[in-house]
Image (spheres, rainbow, N blue to C red):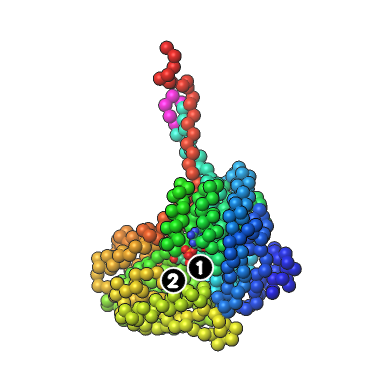
Amino acid sequence: MFLCAVGAGVTSLFRTPWIAAVAAMSTGTFVQLEPLNYRDGARVEPADSCGTEKAFEPATGRVIATLQCSGEKEVSLAVKNAKAAFKVWSKKSGMERCEVLLEAARMIKEQKDAIATMETINNGKSIFEARLDVDTSWQCLEYYAGLAASMAGEHVQLPGGSFGYTRREPLGVCVGIGAWNYPFQIACWKSAPALACGNAMIFKPSPFTPVSALLLAEIYTKAGVPPGLFNVVQGGAATGQFLCQHPDVAKVSFTGSVPTGVKIMEMSAKGIKPVTLELGGKSPLIIFSDCDLENAVKGALLANFLSQGQVCCNGTRVFVQQEIVDKFTEEVVKQTKKIKIGDPLLEDTRMGPLINGPHLERVCGFIKLAKEQGATVLYGGEQYVPTDPKLKFGYYMTPCILTNCSDGMTCVREEIFGPVMSILSFETEAEVLERANDTTFGLAAGIFTRDIQRAHRVAAELQAGTCYINNYNVSPVELPFGGYKKSGFGRENGRVTLEYYSQLKTVYVEMGNVESPFESQ
Ligand SMILES: NC(=O)C1=CN([C@@H]2O[C@H](COP(=O)(O)OP(=O)(O)OC[C@H]3O[C@@H](n4cnc5c(N)ncnc54)[C@H](O)[C@@H]3O)[C@@H](O)[C@H]2O)C=CC1
């Protein structure tokens, strides 16, 4: 009931006491009572609904919000508001858009602790990680603010003094649909380039994590975007479908699972709408015997255990060269045992709970199956109950290391989306490349070696949208991120993403007379 008491019904992020209160909040206290949709510059209850969903605090298993899933009418109102805002925003110069985005970035930075706390409460990731996510979020806004003013076309000289030029123009109303593992960051990674290019956006968070996108919406409004430019519509699959099928939506950018990605693409195909798909993965991490072992072990932990392993680009197939596999395994187990699991709002926690009960069961099911198929659990893989009584109903598990794995096992082939590392040994470079690429996914890959030529040779052969050499899971906003194969297409971050949120117009300019085969004799 906290928000009711503090905000007296009209809680706003911009009331300083509220920010301080949220940043100082402890696990087990937060309840969201305000409307969770955001339209025309304000929080609103949806005009109609197609059911309700409950959002949890994974650390305690408490319900923190019950959301109304937006119906067709609410979606249409959001599109209408976004269209009106687009008319204003798309006329602004790049520098004008830059100023607003920079102000929004500044506000995110200023409110980092409050946003990270909210993210931790709703998602379960450690506060330590949530703060890093907020950093990459404001950095993304700053980056695209900087690019907004440099968007330009070409001038092309043609015969007879005529010429042509190109204009890079926004698409219109874009829809962003997010997953639950990086709720605030995904909202920023989609909206920053969209807004920088002059578009409006309607964002639909995952119903598991509805809360933090609202903070972004409030910040955009306060920073000066026109009302309706960034709207939040809550709901699940049905709401997502209303958004994708709306005739006035120009583009859909989706982050989520492959099966949902297929549906999004089908709907977009019917409307001839461009689509960006950031889907799942089962990425390989290849550790050669000449690596710096300490770094490789750190890299393997980063590749598997951030956000409780619920990361799309995780390197969960850890291929280790035969000569060092025992030493590597011993060291990885030693370091994994040290990971502190517990209340995600405590400063020294490094692993919080998984997103919800069914997902925890699903991840544990993969481990059970791995054992049945012959893998050995070297460490972890069990449900965990922290000693603090308020965490008793949270969704915790110990990080898991599997050995004796083979390429055909389910744990090696399918995305688990939990803290489960499978160790596989290999002998030669050619062999490991073939095995690493033997997957329908292609999101990321990693290589640890001191041999610079091998590093680049292997990176060139790996079928993945991102290859990390001697590190893993670092995502600077300057670098494009996206998949090969069934991990999707289109990119987020980097300069190239401007192309995915804009369209090119060619203008031909005649400087002479019209030559026509139809002119009268
Ligand atoms: N490549 C990337 O950048 C990332 C990919 N992921 C992938 O996301 C998955 C986990 O996220 P989930 O939220 O469980 O995925 P999901 O596919 O179940 O849901 C993703 C979003 O799509 C919406 N949705 C579901 N059905 C829909 C439909 N028929 N039409 C329109 N929208 C619909 C959901 O409400 C949610 O907002 C994993 O497979 C993971 O690999 C997650 C994060 C990043």
Q: Residue at x 58, y 64 (%)?
A: 51
User: x%, y% of residue 195?
Assistant: 57, 51
Do the residues bearing badges 2 and 1 touch, measured as CB atoms within 8 Å? yes
So how many labels did they put on this image?
2
Q: Quadrant of the C terminus?
A: top left
Q: Would residue 437 appear left or right of 47 to someone viewing this image?
A: left
Residue displayed at 55% across by 82% down: 393
Q: Which residue is mark 1?
A: 181
Query: Percent position (x, y) of residue 293?
Result: 36, 76
Q: Position of residue 494 (x, y in %)?
A: 47, 55
The residue labelled by disc 2 is 417
Q: Which label's residue is closer to the chain start, 2 or 1?
A: 1
> How far separated are the C-alphas under marks 2 and 1?
10 Å
Is 158 magenta? The answer is yes
- Span of residues in magenta: 157-161
Please say whether residue 96 is visible from this viewpoint: no
Q: Residue furthest top?
A: 521
Front residue of this view, candidates 368 and 245: 245
Which residue shows up at 60% across the image and 47% down it?
A: 83
- Magenta stretch, overall SS: helix
**SS state under label 1:** loop
Looking at the image, residue 486 sits to the left or right of residue 23; the answer is left
Asked which secondary structure carries label 2, the reply is loop
Kind of residue at disc 2: Phe
Task: Check disc 1 and give the amino acid type.
Answer: Asn
- Depicted 13 relative to depicted 40: above or below: below
Mark 2, Cα crowd under 10 Å, few <14 / some 14-19 / many 20+, is: many
> For the residue with label 1, is its CB less than 8 Å from the closest atom of ligand 1?
yes
